[in-house]
Amino acid sequence: MTEPLLDTDRLLTRAEILELTGFSYASIWTWMRANEFPRSLVISGRVRWREREIRTWLENLPRQRLKGDPPDGVTDGVRPRSGPPGA
C-alpha cells in the first residue's frame, strides 16, 4: 500500500530529479528497476516523484570514509566496551 500524499510533499518532474540528484536518467531508471531508487508516480500520463522520498533517499546514501577516520565502532578514539561498565 502506498503512503498518502502530504500537503507539504511536492511532486517533482524528471528535470527536477536530474538536477536534485546530479545523476543521469539512465542511472535513475536502472536503480528504479532494481528497487534502489523511489519509483515514479504517473499522474494524467505525466511522470512525477515525491520530493520527500527523493530527499530521504539522498539522506540515506552512504558517506565516503576519509583517510584518518576512526574504524567503525570507535568514538572519540575510545572503543566501546563489549561488556557492562567495570567488567
Image (cartoon, rainbow, N blue to C red):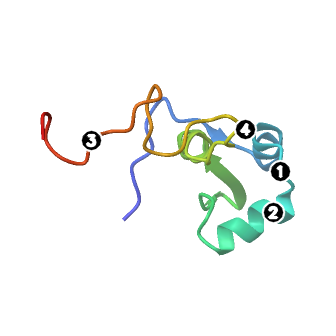
Residue closest to the eye, 59 or 80: 80
User: Toward the viewer: 77 or 10?
Assistant: 77
Q: Residue at x 85, y 65 (%)?
A: 26
CB atoms of marks 1 and 2 within 8 Å = yes
Residue 51 on image: x %, y % = 60, 40
The residue located at (62%, 35%) in the rendering is 69
How far is the residue under mark 2 from the one under mark 3?
Answer: 42 Å
- Circle 1: residue type: Phe
Residue annotated with mark 3: 81
In this picture, is 36 found above or below 4?
below
> What amino acid type should be assigned to the residue bearing mark 4?
Lys
Q: Mark 2 or mark 3: which is in front?
A: 3
Q: Would you call the spot at circle 4 few (<14 residues within 10 Å), some (14-19), or many (20 or more)?
A: few
Q: Is 4 situated left or right of 42 in this image?
A: left
Q: CA distance from mark 1 to mark 2?
A: 7 Å
Q: Which residue is mark 4?
A: 67
Question: Can you tell which mark lies on residue 27?
Answer: 2
Q: Nearer the viewer, mark 4 or mark 1?
A: 4
Residue type beneath disc 2: Ser
Secondary structure at numbered mark 1: loop
x and y percentages locating residue 12 in the rendered image: 69, 42
Which mark's residue is nearer the viewer, 3 or 4?
Answer: 3
Question: Outermost residue, front direction?
Answer: 87
Of labels 3 and 4, earlier in sequence is 4
Task: Measure how far apart labels 3 and 4 are at the Cα level.
Answer: 24 Å
Sequence-first disc among 3 and 1: 1
Q: Which residue is mark 1?
A: 23
Task: Tell me the quarter of the image containing the N terminus.
Answer: bottom left
